[in-house]
Image (cartoon, rainbow, N blue to C red):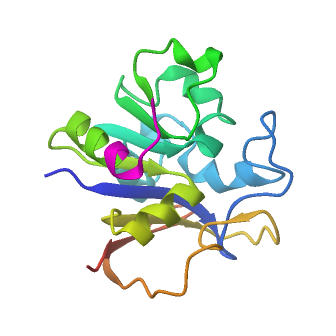
């Protein structure tokens, strides 16, 4: 059965992007450092722990992202990986530059977006991207798992992953820890 899984690189002080995020600077100042662990080196030079994590998220069957993640990334060129369907939660229609891509679907309802992404994913997982979307999914009880790729850097400022969560407690069950070369990969299941 398909699960919604957040895959997110995060600094030790909780930031998923540096300050000054713009379309030309999608991860903010210094934010690229958060993804250095996943650099596309030749497979034989990648650390085994990092490689296993990359292999896992490359097998996901669909992507669900917020507009604030998708558009600054130039929509990943209309193909996140392997031609999977991409669902963008947005109150607005797709901008003209993204509207012609056959794998990209702008959806204005959270539950409908999850349902459609899971349908598209089949028996594979749905990869979730975006801090705001993650918080909404957690509040609605629609996020199944978090995979946090903890990077040993302190960004000091930028966008935090969990800044706007409500006062409700969200319980998590630790599922796995994988030590990579430049990140510690933490997997948690959401307790319902």
Where 151 sits versus 25, above or below? below
- Taking depth in this image into account, of 114 and 21 the one nearest to the observer is 114
Q: Quadrant of residue 24?
A: top right
Q: Quadrant of residue 6?
A: bottom left
Horizontal and vertical percent for residue 21?
80, 48
Q: Quadrant of residue 39?
A: top right
Where 82 sits versus 3, above or below? above
- The residue that appears at 59% across and 41% down in the rendered structure is 67
Horizontal and vertical percent for residue 64?
42, 43
- Taking depth in this image into account, of 140 and 63 the one nearest to the observer is 140
- The residue that appears at 58% across and 59% down in the rendered structure is 131
Q: Is residue 111 in the magenta section?
A: yes
Where 162 sits versus 45, above or below? below
Whether residue 55 is visible, yes or no, is no
Horizontal and vertical percent for residue 26?
74, 41
In the displayed structure image, the side of residue 190 where residue 72 appears, left or right: right
Quadrant where the C terminus is found in the figure:
bottom left
Whether residue 52 is visible, yes or no, is yes
In the displayed structure image, the side of residue 25 where residue 83 appears, left or right: left
- The residue that appears at 33% across and 37% down in the rendered structure is 62
- Taking depth in this image into account, of 93 and 12 the one nearest to the observer is 93
Number of numbered callouts drawn:
0
- The residue that appears at 64% across and 16% down in the rendered structure is 97
Horizontal and vertical percent for residue 104?
45, 25
| Magenta stretch, residue numbers | 106-113
């Amino acid at each position: 059965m398909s699960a919604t899984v957040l895959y997110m690189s995060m600094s030790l002080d909780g930031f998923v992007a540096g300050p000054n995020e713009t379309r030309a600077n999608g991860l903010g100042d210094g934010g690229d450092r958060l993804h250095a662990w996943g650099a596309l080196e030749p497979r034989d030079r990648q650390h085994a722990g990092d490689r296993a994590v990359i292999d896992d998220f490359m097998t996901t069957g669909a992507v669900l992202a917020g507009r604030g993640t998708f558009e600054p990334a130039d929509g990943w060129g209309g193909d996140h990986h392997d031609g999977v369907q991409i669902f963008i939660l947005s109150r607005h229609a797709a901008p003209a530059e993204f509207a012609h891509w056959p794998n990209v679907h702008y959806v204005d309802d959270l539950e409908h977006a999850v349902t459609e992404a899971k349908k598209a994913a089949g028996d594979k997982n749905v990869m979730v991207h975006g801090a705001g979307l993650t918080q909404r999914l957690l509040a609605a009880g629609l996020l199944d798992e978090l995979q946090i790729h903890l990077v040993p850097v302190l960004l000091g400022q930028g966008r935090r992953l969990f800044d706007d969560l409500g006062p409700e407690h969200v319980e998590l069950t630790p599922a796995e820890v994988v030590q990579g070369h430049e990140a510690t990969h933490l997997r948690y299941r959401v307790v319902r």
